[in-house]
Image (tube, rainbow, N blue to C red):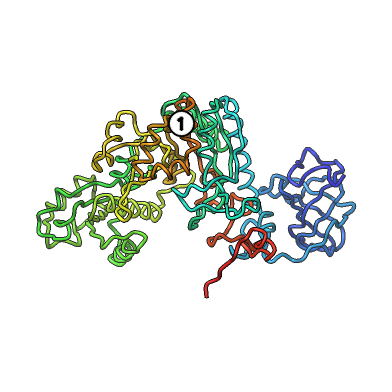
Amino acid sequence: MYRTHTCGELRIGDAGKKVTLAGWVQRTRKFGSMTFIDLRDRYGITQLVLDGDTDLGREYVIQATGQVVKRESVNANLPTGEIEIKVESINVLNKAQTPPFTIEEVSDGGEDLRAKYRYLDLRRAPLQRALALRHRLAQEVRNYLDAQGFMEVETPYLIKSTPEGARDFVVPSRMNQGQFYALPQSPQTFKQLLMVAGYDRYFQIVRCFRDEDLRADRQPEFTQIDCEMSFVQQEDVLDTFEGMMRAMFRNALGVDIPNPLPRMSWYDAMDRYGSDKPDIRFGMEIHEISSLVKGHGFGVFDSADYVGAICVPGAAGYTRKQIDELTEWVKRPQVGAKGLIYIRMGEEGIKSSVDKFYTPEQLSEVAAAIGAKQGDLIFCLCGAKRKTQTQLGVLRIEMGNRLGLRDPKVFAPLWIVDFPLLEWDDETNRFYAMHHPFTAPKPEHMELFYSNRKEDLEKVCANAYDFVLNGNELGGGSIRIHQADVQERMFEVLGISKEDADYKFGFIINAFKYGAPPHGGLAFGFDRLCALFGGQETIRDYIAFPKNNQGRDVMIDSPSLIDREQLEELKLIVKTEK
């Protein structure tokens, strides 16, 4: 055998044993007539000691046989730090070139270089811990859902394009010339069809695909924990998946989360946090101050639909330079504010950037209304209500980051409920589904749903819910439409013609006519969940082979051109821009 033990397994109780280890040479050190070798595999590092010199290079793959002995200089940072192997023989299994960056806890390689040599980066302990956490979480999901009676069912990867959400990735069909498959953005329609088929508790840890712009927490291919249940109402779904998340936190992290989890309506979340995925680990809530600041001659406030403010605790010492920098920060296109008004609660009294329009007493009324005290700093923005609240929400998160209020080791999950069912788009002059077109309206809003008045339809709430953790949406779902006439009405409201609806979704509308049960479910973003459980913002370290910000795999150089013969076989012509 190549090894009797792994490099992370041996302890002081194994002293005296003759063992064989195999792994990669992390580093070698020469001390007098002795050489010390750190041997690494994915389980850990064990120190080898041998008489004389060696020509072993970094990342050589070796097999070493020897006796476990007590280490004279204990390394308390290693689980194996009390022992070492007195080597009797070494067998070089494979030589290695010197890697382009150090295979260490903290590497000297840049992100692009490590992406090109991802298989080397994956040898590093941080990535090994990340993928081990991903594995543990996947096992927790399967164990919990299996115990709850869920069945894991695979759904197709080659499906029909239904471009109502993000852009599809399309796959040309050789056997059906001129026609294309799409890669699934989610298994939504298939899991609903499984409910129609009587498989009343389904789940799948499934790969999904979206051809959209990328960022730190988004990849063109990603993984979901996808679930669906029959004969359930919203409370049944929330209770089931609160239980799953509670088990994952407890068993993977040793953390207990509230039972039950807090719930907040979409409207409250926007009013208080300026976000439908609020980070509730810290306060700094948004307050409307329109009635307090209008009518005093400051035209910017007087003409605004809405004036909102946040109180930044302990920030009264911010300099004018720091406030000017923040003012420029909120003017960036990503935030979109036109300016920033401040009120400083300093030791010398209350001061603001609009002192000429307001007396100290009037500013004190604003401070009292939002709970500000001496030493705090108030920031105000104005404009259209939802837009301004969103801007204040972004500023709130930025100040939370700057003040160190967003501890990745603190977890504050909650449910966001009662979303608007529909979003109106002025450019296209039509409604879009806030979630997707299979989301059911709240039962008490069905009369509004069948109204033809835009104002009524804007009031309809979805029977939907999102699981939010630390300012990130980790999962979302809804009670689904299960009646064909209600589904047809939804397509009508969305401006999808009967012909289009029949072409794109006729299979599911027909299925509903054969006795579809009431059903609902949700999907969790598994990559993002793993990253947050690991205390990270970016998901890339929790995916074995991720893409970069341009959607490329620089390791295998993909996407790439294909042979002319393949194009001809598919009857495709590639046009290049001149």
Residue at 57% from the left image edge and 52% from the top image edge: 180
Place of residue 175 in the rendered image (x, y in percent of width and height, measured from the top left): 65, 51
Viewer-closest of 153 and 310:
153
Q: Is residue 151 left or right of residue 162?
A: right
Q: Is residue 503 left or right of residue 124?
A: left
Q: Secondary structure at mark 1?
A: strand
Residue at 39% from the left image edge and 36% from the top image edge: 488
Q: Is residue 303 left or right of residue 323?
A: left
Place of residue 268 in the rendered image (x, y in percent of width and height, measured from the top left): 30, 40
Quadrant hosting residue 251: top right
Classify 159 as above or below 228.
below
Quadrant of the drawing holding the N terminus: top right
Viewer-closest of 427 and 551:
427
**Residue 49 visible (yes or no):** yes
**Residue 538 visible (yes or no):** no
Q: Which residue is mark 1?
A: 520
